[in-house]
Amino acid sequence: MAGRRSKVPRFYFNFRSPYSWLAYRDLMDRYPDVADVVEWHPWWEPDERNERLMNEAGGTFSYVHMSREKHLYILQDVRRLTRDRGLPVSWPVDEDPVWEICHLPYFLARDAGLGREYIERVYRARWLEGRNICERETVAAIAADLGLPVDKMTAAADDEGLRRTEGLDALLALSRDGAFGVPFFTHGYDKFWGVDRLPAFVESVRARMEPSRAPAAEPAAGGGDFLAVRSGDQGHEGGCG
């Protein structure tokens, strides 16, 4: 998957991950100037169909299963991080989730000029309201709130054309960039993994901005990612995936 690196900074976000949610909140609340210039790339655990398409195209999705001990640690860690930020959290329960159901509609929202609004609503539904974002009813409610076509949004995971175009392109991009976990940021050849690496990513991006657009970065608390069904156990406190 070698290729030319984009000079545009990228944020690989994921709706399942509490650490990705926290990175999203920090990016929007603390670094809105950087949020305005990054490319937003969804990262999700592909189902069997999408992983097959990904492999046939030469991509790979890397993961290892997570231990029970690490899962319990992450529950504790996220409580600390949300408390530090003054954020409530409502833990959702995932039962055989199909992550295409909530991630593929992002492309439709983005094309309608409502990509960030969709991201905010999905994160809110999952982490503040404890709703199952892999239920089509949840996606339907979000679509209706945003004035997006409910039928198309709820059927996005069944759209073979969408899977083979934007969906496959997104999976190949994360494979090409080596985005093995979330949150994950890239800036040229530089990679940043975990919410605690966000300030370093911000500093890298702002260093290439005009001086008037580059305020000083603030420190952020550490935290990585876990996967509920497929998970990384390769991490330090900055991230795993």
Image (cartoon, grey):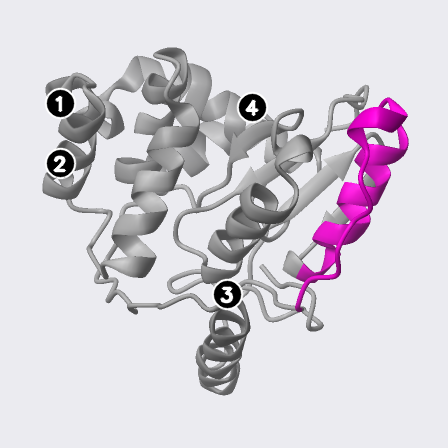
User: Does the magenta-highlighted stretch encompass residue 200?
Assistant: yes
Mark closer to the chain start, 2 or 1: 2
Q: Residue at x 76, y 43 (%)?
A: 202
Between circles 3 and 4, the one closer to the viewer is 3
Mark closer to the chain start, 3 or 4: 4
Alpha carbon of mark 3 to alpha carbon of mark 4: how far? 26 Å
Q: Is residue 163 left or right of residue 212?
A: left
Q: Which numbered dot is residue 89?
A: none
Q: Which numbered dot is residue 141?
A: 2
Q: Which residue is mark 1?
A: 150
Q: Which residue is mark 3?
A: 226
Alpha carbon of mark 4 to alpha carbon of mark 1: how far? 31 Å
**Are circles 2 and 4 on residues that touch, CB within 8 Å?**
no
Between circles 4 and 1, the one closer to the viewer is 1
Alpha carbon of mark 3 to alpha carbon of mark 1: how far? 30 Å
Alpha carbon of mark 3 to alpha carbon of mark 2: how far? 27 Å
Secondary structure under badge 4? loop
Query: Neighbour class for label 2 at 10 Å: few (<14), some, many (≥20)?
Result: some
First to last magenta residue range: 196-221
Secondary structure under badge 2? helix
Mark closer to the chain start, 3 or 1: 1
Q: Residue at x 74, y 37 (%)?
A: 186
